[in-house]
Image (cartoon, helix red, strand yellow):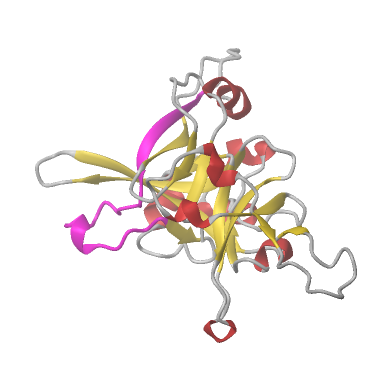
Amino acid sequence: MCGRYALTLTPEELKEILGLLELGAFPARYNIAPTQPILVVVSGQAQERGSNLPDRRAVLVRWGLTPSWVKDPKEFPLLINARAETAIGKASFRAAMRHRRVLVPASGFYEWHRPSKERNEKPQAYWIRPRRGGVVAFAGLMETWSSADGSEVDTGAILTTAANASIATIHDRMPVVIKPEDFARWLDCKSQEPRDVADLMQPTDEDFFEAIPVADKVNKVANMGADLQTPLVVETPQKPPGKKAGDGQLSLF
């Protein structure tokens, strides 16, 4: 799954990488959590023929998709993720898969390795980022929910798929990553039906991400500083008398 992520690139960097028409200022965010506003990229109005201007737009949505047919969001579960394997046919995501596919830019995401209860070990948090840095674009879905009084709320979810071998040691799911050369096809809901983009909803290459163990401060939404991504360094117990030199050392989990 994807339950927390970060977006720390500057607006100028995002605008260039994602081909956005315009993008207002915003601060770096190191701990983006469900129900918070998130930045998503949508396909905009086509430019005049011969224009070199980009046609993609950035909009804010609430993280937690609410289908348009829901009567009371308070009685509906918070859909922060959608399983790529079933999203095309599932009622909650079917319309969004057909008409409102988006990109969710991120600098990386957080995941927790939760050992079995029998092992009696604490969960370990990981900061998972592109090995080469920069921005990554998750496949997302957007839906607008309208209340009885006419007010509207734009909502969104991130698509997930089975984890590749490197991420599977931490968690069995991971976000779907859309490559830059596939941005246009994923966002094109006019000519590309869900079955036409099903091939894009696959795990990334094994070496795309690197996983860095971090402290569990990311569990609290109130913690929002860059220190959330500081690698966790733990000192192993001191070697008892008689042990060889080098038995006690600093190690990265």
Residue at the extreme right of the image, as rendered: 244
The structure residue drawn at horizontal position 35% and vertical position 52%, both measured from the top left corner, is 65
Q: Which residues are magenta?
A: 55-80
Residue 32 left/right relative to 205:
left
Q: Nearer the viewer, residue 39 or 33?
A: 33
Residue 65 left/right relative to 218:
left
Residue at the extreme bottom of the image, as rendered: 118
Residue 90 picture location, percent across and down = 41, 65
Q: Is the residue 132 above or below the residue 18 in the image?
A: below
Residue at the extreme front of the image, as rendered: 241
Residue 137 picture location, percent across and down = 58, 41
Q: Is residue 192 visible?
A: no
Q: Is the residue 211 above or below the residue 45 in the image?
A: below
Residue 122 picture location, percent across and down = 54, 71
Based on the picture, tell me whether residue 151 belongs to the magenta stretch: no
The structure residue drawn at horizontal position 58% and vertical position 29%, both measured from the top left corner, is 18
Q: Is residue 78 visible?
A: yes
Based on the picture, tell me whether residue 68 belongs to the magenta stretch: yes
Residue 206 picture location, percent across and down = 76, 57
The structure residue drawn at horizontal position 68% and vertical position 68%, both measured from the top left corner, is 169
The structure residue drawn at horizontal position 21% and vertical position 56%, both measured from the top left corner, is 73
Q: Nearer the viewer, residue 166 or 153?
A: 166
- The count of marks equals 0
Residue at the extreme left of the image, as rendered: 149
Q: Is the residue 206 above or below the residue 180 in the image?
A: below
Quarter of the image with the C terminus in it: bottom right
